[in-house]
Amino acid sequence: MPIPPNMPGATARYRFDVVVVGGGIAGLSAAVHARELGASVVLLEKAPVTGRGGNTRFADAQMRFPHEADEYGVRDYTVDAMYADLMRISRGRANPDLIRTLCENARAGAEWLTGLGLEWEKGYPHTAGYRRSPKSGGAGVVDLLHRRFEGLGGTVSYETGAIDLIVDEARTVTGVRAHSPEGVVDIEATGGVVLACGGFQANVQMRVQHLGRYADSLILRGSRYNTGEGLRMAIDAGAQPAGQWGDYHSAVLDARSPKIECGVTALYNYQMGIFVDQDGRRFLDEGEDFRDHTYVKFSKHIVEQAGGEAWCIFDQQAYQREEFARAWRPVGAPFEAGSMKELAQLIGVPAENLLDTVGSFNAAVQPGEYDLDRLDGKRTEGIVPAKSNWALPLDRPPYIAIPVTGGITFTFGGLKCDTRARVMDTRGQVMEGLYAAGETMGEIFYYNYPGASSVIRGCVFGRIAAGDAAERAAGGGVR
Ligand SMILES: Cc1cc2nc3c(=O)[nH]c(=O)nc-3n(C[C@H](O)[C@H](O)[C@H](O)COP(=O)(O)OP(=O)(O)OC[C@H]3O[C@@H](n4cnc5c(N)ncnc54)[C@H](O)[C@@H]3O)c2cc1C
């Protein structure tokens, strides 16, 4: 339960203007920006220094934000187009005010990162051309923001996990209690506490409670430290849960990936081949849409409907393409055989089924121009499931098989917030002194995920939370 101020039980008590819980993109953006605004800031990082940075550290940290077309193949992307994409992919369920705020502030967030020294790769073809990749990946973003924060005189407390909120008689959040290397400590926040400590993806009990029985064995792609304390302590203090608590972000992973903190081991090239289950049968439309709009739901389909593990099958026409290697970071060598029959034997799938599946698939492929940069309409006809785009016959040996499964990246359920990142209580009223940003904020993603949107939302709402909390501190904690 939330603790009142001046409760015994802590070995020490500290005071800052802004207390940031968590040091991924959301927490670091909040911490750096609050320091830029002149607030005193402590960032609590549950991980040791070597494990800092949350999911952000494991990500490529690609970001989508509105921008003009460039000569490297990135196309024009407007605020309205981004808004439409995010709303469409959530099937209209995302909070329109939060999404509008995200889209309107995403470019400023990316430019702020650039101003802090972030360097970007040039262009990013084959994914509808709107995303940008930091050269140094997420780990580089984390290191950069830590350098800036420390350069601005911010304080970081490692191995310090927040365990509870401190709440006064007026129900204002005035600080946090945390486990730290010096014992239990209370840290007062005169401006506000920013919860930026991720979702509950690393907590197997919460996963099964909220995501269902398939969720216990999912490969955890990112940080082991995101175990849901931020959500739990806010809800215990009266915060309103919001968003899709029963769903999560995932990806189609090489099934040989490490079970925890595996990082980027996803296959993003499946649209160049076909999926088959352990019986050698296709089970979904691999070319339904750009991979950015399908990898999350395909991953869940494999886990929940296709027996947990499946195979992605390619021929040399796909395997030799330059884009193939770019969209796959091998965990192990692919399985390879000179004929489909041998491949089936090698991977333990009934050969007659695989031959039948590939034979019918090849016969169903329609003529047309193959173009990975657009929904090319090169499809199959007369088979179920169809392949709606990028359908080429698999007829150039040697054939390749990669085992695939689903993993979990982050959870969609979070806290109800307004557009200033202020947490709302179950009466729909603002909880003074409490903010949420990044994965801890709810109502952004539903069912599926528009690629390259999570890091940028952490940056945007981290900065917004910092602005409000710093202003609140400057006003003496009241407004
Ligand atoms: C392999 C992989 C690839 C990805 N690729 C992309 C991509 O290209 N683009 C994109 O937009 N998104 C991507 N994502 C998702 C994205 O990285 C995350 O959703 C985003 O970075 C989350 O940022 P965050 O700040 O909310 O949380 P995190 O980065 O997870 O940070 C949470 C922080 O809170 C700390 N913490 C947890 N509990 C406590 C506590 N009780 N007290 C104190 N600290 C605590 C953690 O240690 C961590 O520092 C990817 C994720 C993974 C794992």
Image (cartoon, rainbow, N blue to C red):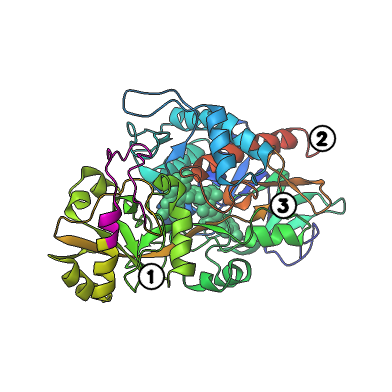
Residue that lies at the very extreme toward the front in this rendered image: 382
**What kind of secondary structure does the magenta stretch mostly adopt?**
loop
Tell me the quarter of the picture where residue 190 sits.
Answer: top right
- Cα distance in 3D space between marks 3 and 1: 45 Å
Q: Is residue 258 above or below residue 314?
A: below
Q: Which residues are magenta?
A: 360-382
Residue tagged by mark 1?
309
Residue named by callout 2: 479
Q: Is residue 274 above or below residue 423?
A: below
Q: Circle 3 sits on which residue?
A: 175
What residue is at 37 percent from the left and 29 percent from the top?
74
Where is residue 348? Give x, y as percent.
26, 76
Q: Amino acid at mark 2?
A: Arg
> With 118 as the anchor, is 32 left or right in this view?
right
Q: Between residue 146 and residue 325, name the one nearer to us.
A: 325
| Disc 1 crowd, CA 10 A, few/some/many (<14, 14-19, 20+) | many
In this rendering, position of residue 148 left or right of residue 439: left
